Each structure stands twice: as structure tokens, then as C-alpha cells.
Image: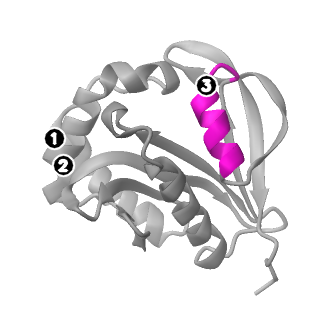
Amino acid sequence: MIRTSRLELRLPSTEDVPDVIRFYTENREHLQPWSPGWPDNFFTEEFWREQVEQREQELRAGLGARMFVFKLSEPARVIGNVSLTQVVRGPLQQCVLGYALAAGEQGHGYMLEAVQGAVRYAFDDLRLHRVEASHMPRNERSASLLKKAGFEAEGLAHAYLLINGRWEDHVNTALVNPDWTAA
């Protein structure tokens, strides 16, 4: 769906299911402190086969794009995810950005590249005016990433999201499409 200089961002296929499970299993400890709770069957092939179809339907309906990140040099290995969800049309014209990267892939600029590609897709293909993203105040890596990608802080939301079983404060940020025009 989205290609950058080093990455491909795309919906999962049924062939990707074993590697999606590998990604989450290997990075569980790394991702869990920043993630909502996962259902009991999250690490099963059945769950992810259902997700393949659900994510395809969500994209076709224009409700979002929940993609995985692959290096062009390793096109069958999931290294992260990027999601554009909660697409709202009408006078708002925005979506919410989420992302995660494997612990062993950090520090190479992959997530910045993936976020920039996803934002371009949100602005150019989905024709949205705003992309919002939030991070917990203590997540300095995420704060730095969003700043580098051009997101501006808009405020602090108290007890904003249930993360890993606890209501966590989040810094809300947004990036506005300077070239947006009504279709």
C-alpha cells in the first residue's frame, strides 16, 4: 500500500500471520507498557486470520488502515505496525495515528520513515485535514518521533487511554495538512 525508500507498509495477508505472531511474541515485553490490553487469543493464528479480513473490510469502508511495517530488504518479516484509525469525515476530516516498532529495529529511523509515509497516505489518498497522535508523557522516544515528524503538542489529556490495565495521561499532538482542499 505505502512504499518509502526502505519500507513497505501494508495490510497483513494470511501468509503474514505466522510472522505477525512472531513480531508480537518477540516484542511482548517491549510493547506491553505502551499498549492497550490484548485479548486472550491475541497470539493465535485464528485471531490474526480474522484480523486479515477485518482490516481489509475496514480499509474498503474508508474507516482506517491498520498496516504492518516491512523492510524492503526483508519483505516477509514484520518489524512494526502503523495504524490510521478513527477516520472522521464531515467538518473534522481527521484520523488517529498509532505505531509500534520492534525493540531490535529502533535507532535506525524506520519509525520516522513509516510515520511520514502514513501521514502522506492520510493526506494524499484519504484526503484528510488532520492526523492526531498521542503519547504518554514518560515516553520520550515517542515524543521525539512525533516532533521530528512535524506534530505539534496540543495539550495533556488526563486518564486518556487504558494502557496495560491502567488509565494513563497522554500528550495529544496533531499535524495539519497545509494543502487540504474540499474535494
Q: Is residue 157 visible?
A: yes
Farthest residue, direction bottom: 183
Residue identifier under label 3? 139
- Please report contact status of discs 2 and 1: CB closer than 8 Å, yes or no: yes
Q: Which residues are magenta?
A: 137-148
Residue at image position (41%, 69%) is 5
Mark 2, secondary structure of its residue: helix
Mark 2 Cα-neighbour bin, 10 Å: few <14, some 14–19, many ≥20:
many
Dot placed on the residue nearer the N-terminal end, 1 or 3: 1
Task: Please state which amino acid type lies under the numbered disc 1.
Answer: Glu
Q: Determine the CA span between mark 1 and mark 3.
A: 31 Å
Foreground mark, 1 or 3? Answer: 3
Residue placed furthest toward the top: 166
Question: Is 98 on the left or on the right of 137, as rendered?
Answer: left
Q: Where, quadrant-wise, is the N terminus in this rendering?
A: bottom left
Residue 141 placement (x, y as % from top left): 58, 32
Q: Which residue is mark 1?
A: 45
Q: Secondary structure at mark 3?
A: loop
Which kind of residue does numbered mark 3 sit on? Asn
Q: Residue at x 71, y 45 (%)?
A: 147
Mark 3 burial class by Cα count in 10 Å: few <14, some 14-19, many 20+: few
Name above or below for residue 176 compared with residue 140: below
On the image, numbered disc 2 is attached to which residue?
Answer: 17
- Side of 13 relative to 173 (left or right): left
In this view, the mark in front (3 or 2): 3
